[in-house]
Image: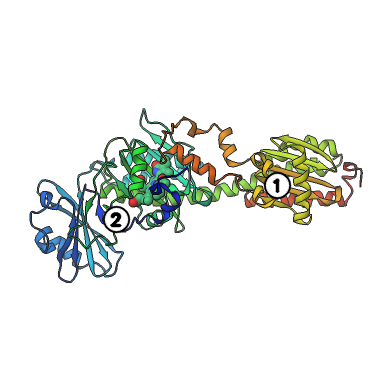
Amino acid sequence: VVTDPDQDVSACDREPIRSPGAIQPHGLLLIADAPSGRVIAGAGAIEDRLAAEWLGLSLETLLGRAVATMVSAMPVGPGSSISTGTVQGMTEDFAVTAHRLAGDRIAIELEPAHTETPWGSGSPLNWLDAVATGFERTGDLTMLCERAASAFRLLTGFDRVMVYRFLDEDSGQVVAEARAAGQHSFLNHHFPASDIPKQARALYVRNRTRSIPDAHYTPAPLRPEGFEMVDLSDVGLRSVSPIHVRYLRNMGVAASASISIVKDGMLWGMIACHHDTPRHLSPELRAAAAALAGNLTRQIRAKEEAELYRERLRLRAAEDALLPRLTGPGASEPALRHLMPDLMAIMAATGFAMVEGGQVHCHGVCPPVIGILEAARWTATRSGGDLFVTHELGAVMPHAGPLSATASGLMALPLAEGGLTLLWFRAEQVQDVEWAGNPHKSMALTPGEMLTPRASFESWSETVRGRSRRWTLEEVEAAHRLRRSLHEAYQSHRLRGLNGAL
Ligand code: BLA
């Protein structure tokens, strides 16, 4: 469906975002030669906002002694950055940030300094501390993310603030949201990996905040000619990929800001902020946002670990309750059938089946009987009588096509002793989202618009076709334990009545 070569999503990973040769015009950029301290290039309305003459002048002349001294004392080597306070422009104050570039050059960013903060004249540290304590007190990951969305909305003042979490294969989902009255919701929406391409994700690990104050801006090119290829990776004013700008405009977003959530060196997610009118995240707020994201990450880790632990306990408790009924005295095939809802629930499956010889008993949403029989036969051969687990049956089992919608995920437990197979099914993830009430349905897709949340969902749907949510390690372990218990029950002939063949 993609006809415009600009919009070929596979090309997204090749978009040269590090050296766009231009900046966003809300600020000014100066590039100086470190040994001489002289300005050799620049971008933005320098003549109107800082100094009529600037090219070839020294940083000291243009920005004053204090800034020049701090810049000359910066650690050598690309990648180091330093905030050097504010300087007075012709009609406004600028916050100044310096970055070391390759080739013994220095980039100086000047951004509007004014800012409103939720701590007012109080201390940012106290404010951040109070919010972090609030994070700590939340009961689980969902509540933590909801609280984070509210806190970041309070901090940034943006109209819509979302916690965007990366999932399988770098696709993502909005897992929490705080928004102003009248803003539509993106909660639970899924997006494909290409919406935040690989090189952008890598850059957001290195630079933890990204501000795009006006999606309708005109890029300000680096001048004079010859500086187009300068690497602006660390420069916050860096001009934005035209494709992403179009995406924001198509979404009706005038300003966007993102804060990275980096866990163990990996991008866990992002706080994505939208505003209906132009809005800048000042350097002061960006620093606070990055600090808050650090606190959030620590709490995410704590909640994830607690959740894993709870999940283990839940599975163990459910098994403990189920096993005596499955294998204890009086266990029989009708009893087993009676327990099908519990067996399905314990694995968070969408369907469950018991196959015994040519007989099939089903619970929940299952594929047609003939498909179930085929899956039971095929998995038993394939796994050599062991547990078989997949989250994309269509990719491993021949002719599994018709099973895909209801059984993309399959966990098959053959109990050779009884000629009995237990099968847990998980529906295709797209199907899952549809059942939950597809949130993307409400988003209109205008003909020709390939970059909208609705189009993103289409593209996400295509990439996850035939896949279910993955089975967790804990669930697979629980299935192994179940297998051992049932096996022991067979050995001691407690389940004799279960199958005529025994
Ligand atoms: C960057 N894409 C981004 C960013 C976000 C998203 C948050 C960070 C920059 C910013 O804050 O705006 C994606 N934003 C989303 C998503 C939601 C959201 C999913 O609010 C959900 C609600 N983007 C595309 C396609 C391409 C693409 C098809 O949709 C292919 C070229 C590219 N996105 C793209 C690029 C960047 C980006 C190149 C980097 C922009 C930059 O930092 O210069």
Q: Are marks 2 and 1 in contact (CB under 8 Å)?
A: no
User: Which colour style is shown?
Assistant: rainbow
Q: Residue lying farthest front?
A: 3
Local crowd size for mark 2, using a 10 Å CA cut-off: few (<14), some (14–19), many (≥20): many
Separation of residues labelled 2 and 1 (CA atoms) = 48 Å
Tag 1: residue type?
His
Secondary structure under badge 2?
A: loop
N-terminal of the two: label 2 or label 1?
Answer: 2
Question: Along the horizontal axis of the image, is 248 left or right of 497?
Answer: left
Which one is in front, 261 or 110? 110
Residue 408 x, y percent position in the rendering: 65, 44
Which one is in front, 407 or 50? 407
Tell whether circle 1 marks a residue whose Cβ is less than 8 angstroms from ligand 1.
no
178 lies above or below 126? above
Q: What residue sits 77% from the left and 45% below the top? A: 374
- The reply to whether residue 269 is visible in this rendering is no
Q: Residue lying farthest bottom?
A: 35
The label shown at residue 399 is 1
Residue 82 x, y percent position in the rendering: 25, 60
Question: Along the horizontal axis of the image, is 44 left or right of 294?
Answer: left
Tell whether circle 2 marks a residue whose Cβ is less than 8 angstroms from ligand 1.
yes
Residue 174 x, y percent position in the rendering: 46, 41
- Residue 146 falls in which quadrant of the image? top left
The label shown at residue 313 is none
Residue 168 x, y percent position in the rendering: 54, 50
Question: Along the horizontal axis of the image, is 358 left or right of 470?
Answer: right
Q: What residue is pinned by disc 2?
A: 20
Q: What residue sits 85% from the left and 39% below the top? A: 333
- The reply to whether residue 393 is visible in this rendering is yes
